[in-house]
Image (tube, grey):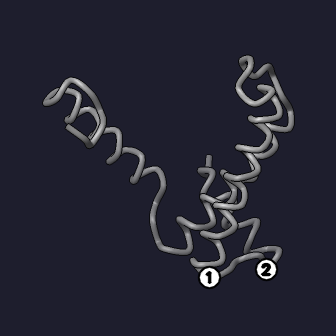
């Protein structure tokens, strides 16, 4: 089975939706803002936990699409990048007791 990044790439190629990395990065930021907006609405600006919300799922899907597009535009394999990130976090956890990059 092909991965998400390849599925997005094939869809974008079929529909001529590929853009430069800069445009794609701005699109990703825009989608991130839409996720944040839906979270604010779903939590009444932090007054309660979000409940199952189709709008959040929809915006996260859009954000994932944009992330896959950006990764392809800059020739990054997201599966390899995630594997490397998890290994980095695990090493920090073992060394520092937490996965963060700070002290």
Please tell me which residue is depicted at 63% across the width and 51% down the height of the picture.
4
Q: Choose between 91 and 40: the one closer to the eye.
A: 40
Tell me if 79 is positioned left or right of 41 in this view: left
- Where residue 23 appears, as percent x and y from the top left, is 65, 77
Q: Choose between 66 and 32: the one closer to the eye.
A: 32
Contact (Cβ within 8 Å) of mark 1 with mark 2: no
- Mark 2, secondary structure of its residue: loop
Q: Residues within 10 Å of mark 1 (few under 14, many from 20)?
A: few
- Where residue 32 appears, as percent x and y from the top left, is 67, 52
Q: Select label 1 or label 2 by which is in front.
A: 1
Tell me if 44 is positioned left or right of 75 in this view: right
Please tell me which residue is depicted at 77% across the width and 26% down the height of the picture.
43
Give the Cα separation between the discs numbered 1 and 2: 12 Å
Mark linked to residue 83: none
Residue furthest out toward the right = 54
Q: Which residue is mark 2?
A: 16
Please tell me which residue is depicted at 21% across the width and 23% down the height of the picture.
97
The answer to whether residue 46 is above or below residue 13 is: above
Q: Dividing the picture into quarters, in which one does residue 44 lie? A: top right
Q: Dividing the picture into quarters, in which one does residue 65 lie? A: bottom right
Q: Residues within 10 Å of mark 2 (few under 14, many from 20)?
A: few
Tell me if 90 is positioned left or right of 18 in this view: left
- Where residue 69 appears, as percent x and y from the top left, is 63, 66
Mark linked to residue 20: 1
- Where residue 78 appears, as percent x and y from the top left, is 48, 55
Please tell me which residue is depicted at 56% across the width and 74% down the height of the picture.
73
């Amino acid at each position: 089975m092909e991965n998400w990044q390849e599925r997005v790439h094939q869809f974008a190629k079929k529909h001529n939706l590929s853009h430069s990395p800069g445009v794609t990065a701005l699109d990703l930021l825009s989608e991130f803002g839409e996720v944040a907006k839906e979270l604010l609405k779903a939590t009444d600006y932090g007054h309660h936990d979000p409940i199952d919300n189709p709008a959040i799922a929809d915006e996260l899907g859009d954000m994932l699409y944009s992330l896959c597009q950006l990764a392809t535009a800059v020739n990054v394999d997201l599966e390899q990048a995630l594997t490397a990130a998890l290994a980095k976090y695990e090493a920090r956890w073992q060394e520092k007791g937490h996965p963060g990059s700070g002290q």
